[in-house]
Image (cartoon, coloured by chain):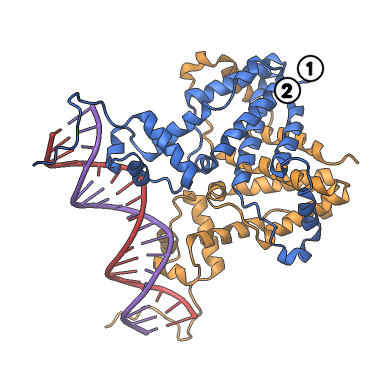
Chain colours: A blue, B orange, C red, D purple
Amino acid sequence: MAPTLKRRTGRPTTSVLSLEGIAEAALRLIDAVGFESMTMKSLASELGVAPSALYNHVPSKAALWLLVQEMLMGEVDVSVFQRLPLPSAMAAWARSYRDVFAAHPGVITGIAVLPVADSPRTLGVYEALASALCAAGLPDARIVSVIVAFESFIFGSALDVTAPENIFDSGEDAGEHPVFARAVAARAALPADPADDAFEQGLAALLALLPAR
Amino acid sequence: MAPTLKRRTGRPTTSVLSLEGIAEAALRLIDAVGFESMTMKSLASELGVAPSALYNHVPSKAALWLLVQEMLMGEVDVSVFQRLPLPSAMAAWARSYRDVFAAHPGVITGIAVLPVADSPRTLGVYEALASALCAAGLPDARIVSVIVAFESFIFGSALDVTAPENIFDSGEDAGEHPVFARAVAARAALPADPADDAFEQGLAALLALLPAR
DNA sequence: ACCTGAACACCGTTCAAGT
DNA sequence: ACCTGAACACCGTTCAAGT
């Protein structure tokens, strides 16, 4: 009559939890409820486990977050640098990078709270970028600056997505800001997605930093 | 013998706390310990008051944060648009904006967690920008895109400051990333501050988005 | 009107106890 | 080796009680 429901198979199964499974569930949860609401308790219940069980695999929430970051870095397409000429490759990489954030909006908040650290994958991306820029003739001393400028713009664009879209839609006091109100209205007439337009404009301008070929 | 130390003056003083005083103390605390560690308790003890007393002046920590944001927006110099031609004015504004974040590094974290909302001062900045761009001949439909592109770059640059500077200094496995390692080393030889160099490069490139005069 | 102190629900994390 | 449940210090916020 003892409750012997658990461990139904005779063979001792390996641990229910795995680093990969935890990181994937964490990302799923961040996507669903945002970074701030992804709690060790909610993550544990998602995995059908007690919160304290997580600490057998991950030393802290911060370490877990680094795992998620590393996972996301793998989604950024760096193969373009081996297939395309520099300006196109740089543009493709930037779009891929931003698309990762667009697909996981909650993540950018986490990056601000716990900055991206030097991980194998992050350094791999930097090496691919530096190699392409160097091969194109950019002086060594300027390579990091160009990388940082691009990355700043990409991060900022991702952060911008977080901001409320209706920053001026409630035109109650539009009379106080007539020019800006007119610009906001005119923006809706753009052929492409307005949000993408700002990114594409900035990206095109930044491409001028690359050495002319 | 009763402890009658408090209320030393006969005249009934007005409240010890004020909205301004609270916001200023909050910013001071954010600067000192970072956004995440600025707690209602620490803020209260800084002001010599019980935590619950703060709720007589501010409905929530989120509302308090908006107050701080609004305060900071006042430090951004928008007068340049009335004194300088467009490209110089835009550059001066961007530098001023970034300098505010540089002076208060903890703030950028808060902006990611609680995005900047439409406040009187924020809209005032947008109106000044839109007016200058419009007067320079930029089509209405592109004004917001250009503003967003600049702001994304500025926010991203501020976010970059948050990241650890030593992202490659510990050159243990520099052999795996030789080109990037060389670029990092060469960067130190730059005449200006390396961190500023990336910002200035990106800013110069973005200025190409302004209409040619 | 404004402050205090106790209380509440919720965090991340630790640890003895079980299997 | 890995999970549970209780516990700890800490959050933001509420509220009755005082002045």
Label ID, residue A213:
1
Tell me if B56 is positioned left or right of B133 in this view: left
- Return the x and y of residue B51 as percentages of the image width and height: 40, 65
Pointer 2: what residue?
A: A87
Categorize mark 2 by other alpha carbons within 10 Å: few (<14), some (14-19), many (20+).
many
Q: Nearer the viewer, residue B144 or A112?
A: B144
At mark 1, the secondary structure is loop
- Return the x and y of residue B201 as percentages of the image width and height: 72, 32
At mark 2, the secondary structure is helix
Q: Amino acid at mark 2?
A: Pro
Q: Is residue A148 above or below residue B159?
A: above
Do discs 2 and 1 belong to a common subunit?
A: yes
Q: Nearer the viewer, mark 2 or mark 1?
A: 2
**Residue at 82% across, 41% down:** B210
Q: Nearer the viewer, residue A93 or A7?
A: A7
Label ID, residue A21:
none
Q: How many marks?
A: 2
Dot 2: chain letter: A
Q: Nearer the viewer, residue A77 or B76?
A: A77
Q: Earlier in the sequence, mark 2 or mark 1?
A: 2
Q: Is residue B168 above or below residue B138?
A: above
Q: CA distance from mark 2 to mark 1?
A: 9 Å
**Residue at 65% across, 51% down:** A165
- The furthest residue to the right: B213
Q: Quadrant of the N terminus of chain B?
A: bottom left
Dot 1: chain letter: A
**Are circles 2 and 1 on residues that touch, CB within 8 Å?**
yes
